[in-house]
Amino acid sequence: MSEPIRNKKLDNLAAPTPQNTPSNAAPISSRAQQPGVASIKEEEMERAAAGLFAANPALVSMMQAKLGTLVGRSSGYIESLPVSVRRRVAGLKGIQKEHSKLEAEFQEEVLQLEKKYFAKFTPLYQTRAKIVNGAQEPSEEQVKVGEAEDSDDEDEEETKEEPNKDEGADIKGIPEFWLSAMKNQISLAEMITDRDEAALKSLVDIRMEYLDRPGFRLIFEFAENEFFENKTLSKTYFYQEENGYGGDFIYDHAEGEKINWKTGKDLTVRVESKKQVNKTTKQTRIVKKTVPTESFFNFFDPPKPPTDEEDEDAASDIEDRLELDYQLGEDIKEKLIPRAIDWFTGEALQYENMEDFDEGDFEDDDDEDDEDDLSDDRDDDDDSDDENDGSKPKQEAAECKQS
């Protein structure tokens, strides 16, 4: 079950209380006069303020510290209420505590229910892995059900050639199954580089397991390959020990397994060559150094939560990276693993795209008459559109990303 990443800095802040408001609105004078000083444009004020803050970083720090102490502090409204009313407020807080306890119990039961059905899913995942890797063939019943589903999506009048049953008889399992599935899953595809594909072709299975404490572990199993020694690479997502405000589990951090790269095969770095000239002898030499580079395998080296020593910008950047890292793990756990075949074929993309649209994005077309009136004008423009076919290619349906 997906859980949003919480900002831990805000977890301990109390909700602000309402401010006192006057019983009567302030009267507006009928003899109001314009101010006697020239008006100052907002842009000029902003520039002046920015210059002031830039020249006085200590002032900025002091203001931030002061504001930090004000967040969550009472305005005095609750304290100003009569004793009998404050007693009722305290009673409502007590009721809310009971609600939070029940919510925590609910979340725990949901987790146990997920584990119960995950145990039922596991044999299906194991059979899938055997078929993908050529250790087992699907049953006739399984093939029949799968073909029936495919036929529902095809035109019944379309004539198909009789398949050659001997074609591909020497191919074992489904080559590059997981790589193709991952390349169709948008969030994962963005992380996979051309260099990564050679290593990910040896990926034979992706599975998940729950921890004894709230959290889960993703396990990537590989065949023997030229890049690293590991047979499996795992990444574990941990939740905080205490539940959140509404009883939800709160994500804490992730830990990835160290990759034992073979010599010269580390995909998370690249080698840069730089020519240096000796000032005295004028001799030149080539210096090589490794620098970090983009790679899917950076997934197993997740970002660490920000410390109190981090400045605001750095902490915000780390929080964004933590959120992205957590979402990737959730996508693998909740989308890729349960429906791997749909990602391999690309069928899952149509359901994924529908999630990008809200009902409010669509509206009824009440201008049918107007469309008819404009049809003649469009017909007149057809010739000019045809002339520009070379410069304006037609949009085509997206193809499945399969190697």
Image (cartoon, rainbow, N blue to C red):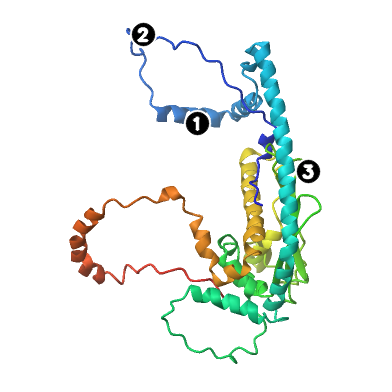
Residue 149: image location, x then y, percent? 54, 73
Badge 3 local density, few (<14 within 10 Å), some, or many (20+)?
Answer: few
Quick one: label 1 or label 2, which is nearer the N terminus?
A: 2
Q: Is residue 281 visible?
A: no
Say the numbered circle drawn on residue 29.
2
Give the amino acid at mark 1: Ala
Quarter location, residue 105? top right
| On screen, residue 68 above or below 382 | above
Residue 304: image location, x then y, percent? 72, 49
Give the amino acid at mark 3: Glu
Q: Is residue 344 left or right of residue 221?
A: left
Q: Distance between the residues labelled 1 and 2?
A: 35 Å
Give the amino acid at mark 2: Ser
Query: Regarding mark 1 in the picture, which secondary structure is present there?
Result: helix
Residue 59: image location, x then y, percent? 60, 26
Query: Regarding mark 2 in the picture, which secondary structure is present there?
Result: loop
* Residue at numbered disc 1: 50
Q: Distance between the residues labelled 3 and 1?
A: 43 Å
Residue at image point 63% right, 12% down: 80
Residue 266: image location, x then y, percent? 70, 68
Quick one: label 3 or label 2, which is nearer the N terminus?
A: 2
| On screen, residue 59 above or below 317 | above
Quarter location, residue 333? bottom right
Quarter location, residue 134? bottom right
